[in-house]
Image (cartoon, rainbow, N blue to C red):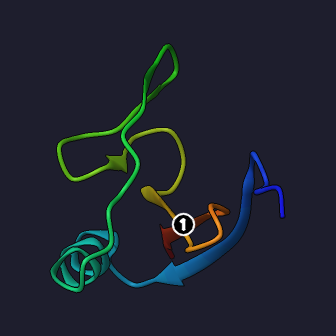
């Protein structure tokens, strides 16, 4: 299996902060990005350029996200 290099599934959530906090408690690690035009905060959440979103990888290395509705 070769993991996808793009987001393959978005999970819409009412609050991305609450979802990240809960998933972090359960052992999920969120991706951190620091690129021009794409920066995440200390929790791994990108804010201010569309909906708030945080990315993480599934066990196979595919990229998933929680996305604020």
- Indicate the position of residue 52 as horizontal and vertical percent values: 42, 56
Q: How many marks?
A: 1
Dot 1 surroundings within 10 Å: few (below 14), some, or many (20 or more)? many
Q: Residue at x 17, y 43 (%)?
A: 42
- Res. 63 image quadrant: bottom right
Q: Residue at x 51, y 76 (%)?
A: 69
- Indicate the position of residue 25 as horizontal and vertical percent values: 15, 81
Judged left or right of residue 1, residue 54 is: left
In depth, the one of 38 and 55 nearer the eye is: 55
Using the image, determine if residue 17 lies above or below residue 53: below
Q: Residue at x 34, y 71 (%)?
A: 16
Judged left or right of residue 58, residue 24 is: left
Using the image, determine if residue 13 lies above or below residue 6: below
Q: Secondary structure at mark 1?
A: strand
In depth, the one of 69 and 28 nearer the eye is: 28
**Residue topped by disc 1:** 65
- Indicate the position of residue 40 as horizontal and vertical percent values: 34, 38
- Indicate the position of residue 67 as horizontal and vertical percent values: 51, 68
Q: Residue at x 50, y 56 (%)?
A: 51
Using the image, determine if residue 16 lies above or below residue 62: below
In depth, the one of 16 and 7 nearer the eye is: 7
Image quarter in which the N terminus is found: bottom right
Judged left or right of residue 16, residue 67 is: right
């Amino acid at each position: 299996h070769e993991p996808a290099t793009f987001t393959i599934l978005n999970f819409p959530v009412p609050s991305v902060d609450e979802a990240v906090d809960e998933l972090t408690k359960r052992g999920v690690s969120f991706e951190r990005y620091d690129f021009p035009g794409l920066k995440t905060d200390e929790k791994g959440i990108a804010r201010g350029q569309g909906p708030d979103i945080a990315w993480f990888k599934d066990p196979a290395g595919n990229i998933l996200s929680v996305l604020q509705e």
